[in-house]
Image (cartoon, rainbow, N blue to C red):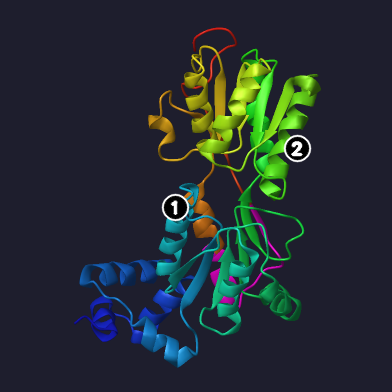
Amino acid sequence: MTTIVKVAEAAGVSTATVSRVLSQPERVAAETRDRVLEVVRALGYSPNVAARSLRTLRAAKILLTVPDISNPFFASVIRGAEEAARDAGYAVVLGDTRHDPDVEDQYADMLSRREVDGLIFLGHRLPASVMPLIERLGASAPVVNGCEYSAELPVPSVHIDNAAAAGDAIDHLIALGHRRIGVITGPAISPISRDRLAGAERAAARHGLSSALDLCVGDYSARSAFDHTRELLARGVTAMFCFNDEMAMGAISAIGRAGLSCPGDVSVVGFDDLPLAPFFQPALTTIAQPKGQIGRRAVDLLVGILRGTPEPVERVTLRHQLIVRGSTAPVGGARC
């Protein structure tokens, strides 16, 4: 079995340096760090996380809660988080809260019981059970938010500019000549839904088309968009913007069921750029979020707190991108 002693001998460093590379890599010179990591990979060394936990009185685990684990968007976020956590010497405990505040609190209680060292929550609610901890520790509280940014959350967060992203989607449709655009939002309780709606409305107003948007409230499911699309088609929309890709796919299905084509009769823009988006028929025009990077950066923020180097409450805004594919075209014609 490969031990830390064998790694140290092969890399020509002390066992303390190997330990530091694996637990606090930022404290080790880049050349030494790279040499040690190369030996770790070559020898297949895996640190004994359980033993280290007993020595440091830490669980060496991070709790990551997800509002809906069935939503494929979160899969890439989780993968990015797990990769970063593993590199930092932590395991990830995953909790599916199903948008239930009671379940969110039950998972968050693991932090107060020290079953986990920190919490990353991907929903919009800060669990009530961690508020006393945040009030006591401030920026040192090991709690980070990912995806659903709200200025009211007193914790570090990683997100995109949802308002600007939605504005890009509306700008794209208006540039194609669309003047009657259906918008299927998420629930109003969701900060990202509110931000995307505000961005869409501001973009329409910039073009002097404040009345161009026809709104329906969905629930991020394909079924909700399928049902609302029939209503929007009856209103005469020539394009649709859905607040996630699942709803966009439901909308395209409803357009076909109505005997119309996408994008020949109705253009559709989604949001998230799910792995299926390029392979859907037609390939989906959408806003791409850096999903894996959201997970990795959230872990980086949390690990910084756990290692005693917290910054003032930090808001990390990552870049989004409008990806134009086959589901959008100029109004009244096939895609150029």
Question: In this view of the protein, can residue 199 be seen by the observer?
Answer: yes
The quadrant in which residue 238 appears is top right
Q: Say if 96 sits above or below 287 in the image.
A: below
In primary-sequence order, the first of circles 1 and 2 is: 1
Residue 75's disc is: 1
Question: In this view of the protein, can residue 207 be seen by the observer?
Answer: no
**Residue 216: percent from the left, percent from the top?**
68, 32
Residue type at mark 2: give it: Ala
The residue at the point 23 percent across, 71 percent down is: 44
The magenta span reads: 299-316
Q: Are marks 1 and 2 in contact (CB under 8 Å)?
A: no
**Residue 304: percent from the left, percent from the top?**
57, 71
Q: How far apart in space, not on screen, are marks 1 and 2 (Cα)?
A: 27 Å
Residue 203 is left or right of residue 263, and the answer is right
Q: Say if 125 sits above or below 231 in the image.
A: below
The quadrant in which residue 215 appears is top right
**Residue 174: percent from the left, percent from the top?**
67, 18
Q: Say if 331 sits above or below 35 in the image.
A: above
Residue type at mark 1: give it: Ala
Decide: few, some or many residues near mark 2? Use Cα within 10 Å; few <14, some 14-19, many ≥20.
some
Label 1 secondary element: helix
Question: Nearest the camera: 8 or 225?
Answer: 225
Residue sticking out furthest to the left: 1
Check residue 308 for magenta coloring: yes
Residue 198's disc is: 2
Question: Nearest the camera: 223 or 322?
Answer: 223
Question: Nearest the camera: 36 or 215?
Answer: 215
Residue 158's disc is: none
The residue at the point 47 percent across, 28 percent down is: 284
The residue at the point 45 percent across, 67 percent down is: 85
